[in-house]
Image (cartoon, rainbow, N blue to C red):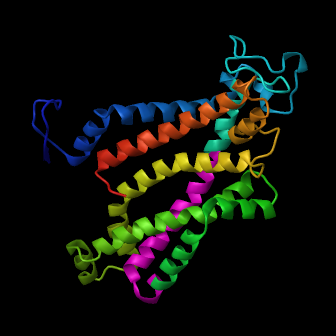
Amino acid sequence: MSVLPDGAPGNSRMMTSRQMALWRFTRNPAAMIGAVIVISVVTAAILAPWLAPSPESAGAFVDFRNRHAPPSADNPMGTDNVGRDIFSRVLFGYRVSLGLVLGVLGVAVPLGVVLGLCAGYFGGWIETIIMRFTDIMLALPPLAMALAITAVLSPNLINAMIAITLLWWTWHTRLIYRIVKAQMNEDYVEAAKVAGASHGHILFRELLPNCIPAIAVKTSLDAGFVILFGASLSFLGLGIQPPTPDLGTMVATGAEYMPEMWWQAVMPGLAILYAILGFNLLGDGLRDMLDVEL
């Protein structure tokens, strides 16, 4: 139980730590704005076929009579060089971006967490091998490494996921390793060992729950960076290929018509900024709510 600060709801001045954390989150304007932005991006991606004014613009569609049209009531973000509605393509582009986030973090986070747990718990030669390999991977320039991988493989969504995932697990390994090393001398770990608990029980039932807040915050912050990283690959021509709507590719194509037809690059760029801002604000809010230091 925790004593509530002034202005807390309810007649009682006491509440559980979970209630206190939720109360702090809802009183954080930036965190709430981030949550609303993330929900709107996810909703737009899921409902894209119904929200898009021109769903056919997400595919191999051309309308040369309407090409380079500026923003209007019919086309809120204007049209591109072949007459496709940019707003519709942005909505479908969010599907690609969120798919990249799920694919990369769905593999990188569990992998990094398990390696960090093992390195911090077992120590010795296991720690040396895992952490030295992690150090080597961290020393490689991320974007250069991803460019090299996608240049060897054919540019598509799956290969972009592979390229980013090969680099992303390292930060989670470092984070969890540091937390586990700090927890190894705590009483609950010693008690579990004395009670004869197995390594698996200590790792996943005792240590892992204490890492969950840090994992949640780190994953939320990483989502925005993955979107930016994927858009960077696509901007350089090594990500998702046309006609699949991808925000980075749309910015690259629209940049050819700057500054006269600014909307073709600016609107997808603002869409990227909007999504990244949402995940960053949400991550900061979770960090304050859970009182985590990364």
x 42%, y 57%: residue: 215
Task: Report whether residue 293 is seen.
Answer: yes
Q: Position of residue 282 (x, y in %)?
A: 42, 41
| Along the line of sight, the residue nearer the viewer: 212 or 28 | 28
Q: Name the side, left or right, on which 222 lies relative to 260.
A: left
Q: With respect to residue 16, does 89 lie above or below?
A: above
Image quadrant in which the C terminus is located: bottom left
x 36%, y 42%: residue: 285
Q: Name the side, left or right, on which 190 lies relative to 173.
A: left
Q: Position of residue 101 (x, y in %)?
A: 59, 49
Residue 164 in magenta stretch: no
Q: With respect to residue 265, does 202 lie above or below?
A: below
Q: Quadrant of residue 268?
A: top right
Task: Report whether residue 91 is seen.
Answer: no
Q: With respect to residue 45, does 172 lie above or below?
A: below
Q: How many marks?
A: 0
Q: Name the side, left or right, on which 209 lies relative to 74.
A: left
Q: Quadrant of residue 267?
A: top right
| Along the line of sight, the residue nearer the viewer: 280 or 97 | 280
Q: Quadrant of residue 117?
A: bottom left
Q: Residue furthest top?
A: 73
Residue 109 in magenta stretch: yes
Q: Position of residue 146 (x, y in %)?
A: 68, 61
Q: Residue furthest bottom?
A: 125
Q: Position of residue 272 (x, y in %)?
A: 60, 37
x 80%, y 25%: residue: 84
In terms of secondary structure, what is the magenta stretch mainly? Answer: helix
x 41%, y 65%: residue: 175
Find the magenta span and give its range. 99-127
| Along the line of sight, the residue nearer the viewer: 196 or 216 | 216
| Along the line of sight, the residue nearer the viewer: 183 or 255 | 255
